[in-house]
């Protein structure tokens, strides 16, 4: 289950950003996960609960937003929502596509507390 290693990397990112902001606590974190990223949201949530104990993210509110995959057909240029890998283009039925959105996994924002409240956006 690679979701656990992803959560451990997210913890590292949060710790690094806390140091940069001279903060003492993370109040909230928002993640974006593409529907074609290969990340299972349920496994990520399960891993999250286990991995964040005794870390800077233990008491943080976590929001996970799934990003719908959008592809552009390399043959005809049609842009369309992709729900399955290798889903053919609805215009020409070709399967060679470029993903425009939906393969990402990123920390969209962190809300940290210090002597003053700061909101970090990436």
Image (cartoon, rainbow, N blue to C red):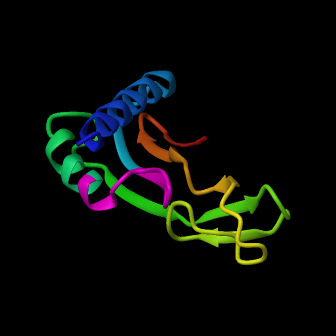
- Queried whether the magenta region covers residue 9, the answer comes back as no
Q: Nearer the viewer, residue 50 or 117?
A: 50
Q: Is residue 1 above or below residue 100?
A: above
Location of residue 79 in the rendering, given as x and y in whole percent from the top left corner: 77, 68
Q: Residue at x 51, y 44 (%)?
A: 106
Q: Position of residue 109 (x, y in %)?
A: 52, 47
Residue at point 33%, 33% (across, down): 11
Tell which residue pokes out farthest to the bottom in this image.
90
Looking at the image, which residue is at 48% across and 39% down?
116
Give left or right: position of 28 versus 21: left
- Residue 103 appears at what percent x and percent y? 55, 50
- Quadrant housing residue 74: bottom right
Which residue reaches farthest front? 93
Q: Is residue 76 above or below residue 106?
A: below
Q: Position of residue 90 (x, y in %)?
A: 71, 77
Horizontal placement of 12 versus 100: left or right?
left
Image quadrant containing the N terminus: top left
Query: How many tags in the picture?
Result: 0
Left or right: where 86 falls relative to 74 = left
In front here: 115 or 55?
55
Range drawn in magenta: 29-43
Which of 11 and 23 lies nearest the eye of the viewer?
A: 11
Quarter of the rendering occupied by the C terminus: top right
Which residue does the image show at 33% across and 59% down from the upper left?
41
């Amino acid at each position: 289950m690679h979701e656990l290693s992803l959560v451990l990397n997210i913890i590292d990112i949060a710790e690094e950003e806390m140091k940069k902001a001279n903060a003492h606590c993370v109040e909230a974190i928002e993640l974006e996960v593409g529907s074609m990223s290969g990340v299972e949201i349920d496994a990520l949530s399960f891993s999250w609960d286990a991995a964040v104990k005794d870390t800077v993210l233990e008491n943080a509110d976590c929001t996970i937003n799934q990003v719908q995959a959008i592809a552009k057909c390399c043959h005809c240029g049609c842009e369309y929502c992709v729900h399955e890998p290798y889903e053919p283009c609805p215009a020409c039925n070709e399967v060679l596509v470029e993903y425009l959105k939906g393969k990402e996994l990123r920390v969209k924002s962190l809300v940290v507390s210090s002597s003053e409240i700061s909101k970090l956006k990436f």
